Amino acid sequence: MNIVHKAEQYVIQLFKDKLSPVYSFHNLEHTKRVVAATELLAKEENVNEKDMEILTLAAWFHDVGYCQTCTVHENVGMQEAEIFLKQENISQEEIDAVKQLIHATSMEYQPQNLLEKIMKDADCSHIGSEDFFNITETLRQECKQVYQKKISKLDWANTNLQFLTQHHRFYTDYAKKNWEETKTENVEKTLELIADLIKDKEKSKNTEEEKALLNKKKLEKLDSPERGIETMFRVTMNNHTRLSQIADTKANILLSVNAIIISVALSTIIPKLDSPKNAHLVIPTFMMIAFSVATIIMAIMSTRPKISSGTFTRKEIEERKVNLLFFGNFHKMPIDEYMWAMKEMMKDRTYLYDSLVKDLYYLGIVLNRKYKLLRTTYTIFTVGILVSVLTFYLAFREII
């Protein structure tokens, strides 16, 4: 029996004997999922047999710490792995390598090499899975049980959205190519889920008692609508920002895909075009490259930022002509001038709200341009793929 199989049997028994049933996510099923993802990534990234063994051992032991604690489980997992591997007479060098990969699964850790990147991507492989929402629901239930607190579906959806858009990224080439698109779809579905949950929450509040209380508060605050206005600005700004992030993600996907297409063409097809017998492939190849280059250019244009002059005068502030909420209008100004201008704006509620409205308006203009370019980019890419396939087909049919 090889060491990986022994480790598998050991971990399965450990989870069976010591893991609390409250851990509905960090359990044997999750570990098996990580092991499978690790083996897949290692194979696709052409990892050698020895490193494959180290990765698989780390995958089996990376969450066994939950059998004792959820706070420093990586450290406990490293200790368990070392005890087991020493009993199996594994070298200290290999033990240290396994421990380092377990440490790499820590939330805040940034991978330093290919093996650590594989480990990080494997541990979060469910993010690029169509079963993401079922899996993350088990994590919500686990958090409720372990920390003994209520976590609403809306709060959990917002937490997931923040993690997906701000804290998580895939590191290996295979994960970027095969899982990133599904991750983007999961982000979009999370946004839709949040919108639906907010609607349901609003409906549930419409009881007679709450309506009476709401009417009372409205009567008390007829002259103070600021809170509703602030909420409107905050929600709208967040939605605009999220839409911008989604557009950038889609553009990055197109950049990556077409860069791969060009790379493959330059390294495998073009060197063979010198041969007379491959002359029929010249036009299809360069047509495919041309469409890929056009797609890349359009994707870059959709994410290319535009920055204003960054200066203003006191006269412009006094005449209420400058939007101080957009960095492009003040990034070259001295801090004293900017603070004076902000204080002037805060004194005038109309000027303040006008600035917020302008900020939303121009952000909407930018989003409109970004999504129009992105739509054109996808059209070019789609047409390019179809035309390239057709020309290759015709070229091969002619030669045959």
Image (cartoon, grey):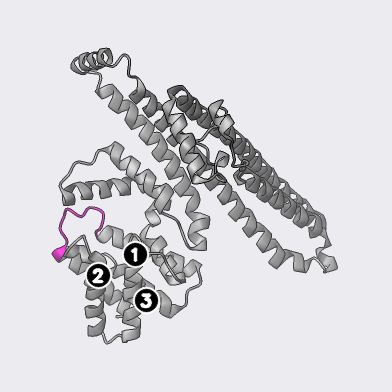
**Precedes in sequence: disc 3 or disc 1:** 3
**Precedes in sequence: disc 1 or disc 2:** 2
**Precedes in sequence: disc 2 or disc 3:** 3
Image coordinates of residue 174 in percent, x first then y, are 50, 61
Q: From the image, tell me which residue sits under label 2.
A: 75
Q: Quadrant of the C terminus?
A: bottom right
Answer few, some or many: residues within 10 Å of disc 1's Cα (few below 14, many 20 plus, some between 14 and 19): many
Q: Residue at x 22, y 70 (%)?
A: 76
Stretch of the chain drawn in magenta = 18-27
Establish if 399 lies above or below 208.
Answer: below
Rendered image quadrant of residue 99: bottom left
Q: Residue at x 58, y 30 (%)?
A: 315
Mark 2–mark 3 Cα distance, whole angstroms, equals 17 Å
Q: Decide: marks 2, 3 in contact (CB < 8 A)?
A: no
Q: Amino acid at mark 1?
A: Thr
- Provide the major secondary structure of the magenta segment: loop
Please give the label number shown on residue 105. Answer: 1
Rendered image quadrant of residue 370: top right
Circle 2: element type: helix
Q: From the image, tell me which residue sits under label 3.
A: 54
Relative to the observer, which residue lies in front, 365 or 25?
Answer: 365
Circle 3: element type: helix
Tell me: 164 left or right of 384.
left
